[in-house]
Amino acid sequence: MPFLYLFTHKMTETQHLRAIILPVAKELQRPLWSVMIPTYNCADYLRETLASVLEQDPGSEFMQIEVVDDFSTKDDPKAVVEELGKGRVKFYQQPQNVGYISNFNTCLQRSQGKLVHLLHGDDCVRRGFYHRLQLAFEKQPNIGAAFCRNIVMDENSNWQWFSRLLRQKSGVLENWLEQIAIINLLQPPSIVVRRDVYEQLG
């Protein structure tokens, strides 16, 4: 399993320019995890995505799993969700195409868990991902997000290359903002963020 890299969050002056993510209603029973899967015309890949999550499913009490489709026109993601999810995975489709950023925001707004994982519909997670990331948040309760290395693969699931190793052991990264200001060192499916961070930052 790849090493974990953790960092804290900080409020910025541009917060007001971002979409507002409202807190979850207090009366709702909240799971620890929200695995939100944005999709658009990628139903063929969605099968592997869902299978990789369901293999690690701790149950609906602990994990929300939902596919949020941006009005796909070339395939039927709902049929894939019904086939693989068997009622365990929720499905929501936009009434019209809204674009990937707005669809990501819809995922965040519909999430109810304390930890949010945005997993693209053409990506997947390796065994142990959720367990290891959960341990990171438990060991470092002050962090806003945690991520691991990622593996780039082609359309046939053949591994191409690994992302760069940033430190030898798991822990909080120093000078992280300075590092990512130069180059993006992670991919969205490899990161998990506390929902209250999205509520604060948008």
Image (spheres, rainbow, N blue to C red):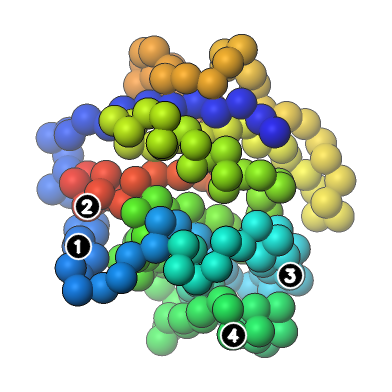
Q: Quadrant of residue 19?
A: bottom left
Q: Quadrant of residue 28?
A: bottom left
Q: Is residue 6 left or right of residue 19?
A: right
**Residue 199 numbered tag:** 2
Q: Is residue 71 left or right of residue 164?
A: left
**Nearest-to-viewer mark from 3 and 4:** 4
Q: How far from the left and from the top, in percent, is residue 171?
A: 47, 19
Confirm or deny contact between disc 2 and disc 1 (CB under 8 A). Answer: yes
**Residue 87 numbered tag:** 4
Front residue (pair 75, 55): 55
Neighbourhood count class around disc 1 (C-alpha, 10 Å): few under 14, some 14–19, many 20 upward: some
Residue 3 drawn above or below residue 56? above
**Nearest-to-viewer mark from 1 and 4:** 4
Query: The residue under label 2 is which amino acid type?
Result: Glu
Distance, label 2 to label 4, CA atoms, is: 29 Å
Q: Is residue 172 left or right of residue 82?
A: left
Q: Which secondary structure lies at badge 3?
A: helix
Q: How far from the left and from the top, in percent, is residue 181?
A: 39, 22
Distance, label 3 to label 4, CA atoms, is: 15 Å
Query: The residue under label 4 is which amino acid type?
Result: Gly
Residue where numbered disc 1 is placed: 22
Give the mark nearest the N terminus, 3 or 2: 3
**Residue 47 numbered tag:** 3
Front residue (pair 71, 194): 194
Query: The residue under label 1 is which amino acid type?
Result: Leu
Distance, label 2 to label 1, CA atoms, is: 6 Å
Neighbourhood count class around disc 2 (C-alpha, 10 Å): few under 14, some 14–19, many 20 upward: some
Query: The residue under label 3 is which amino acid type?
Result: Arg
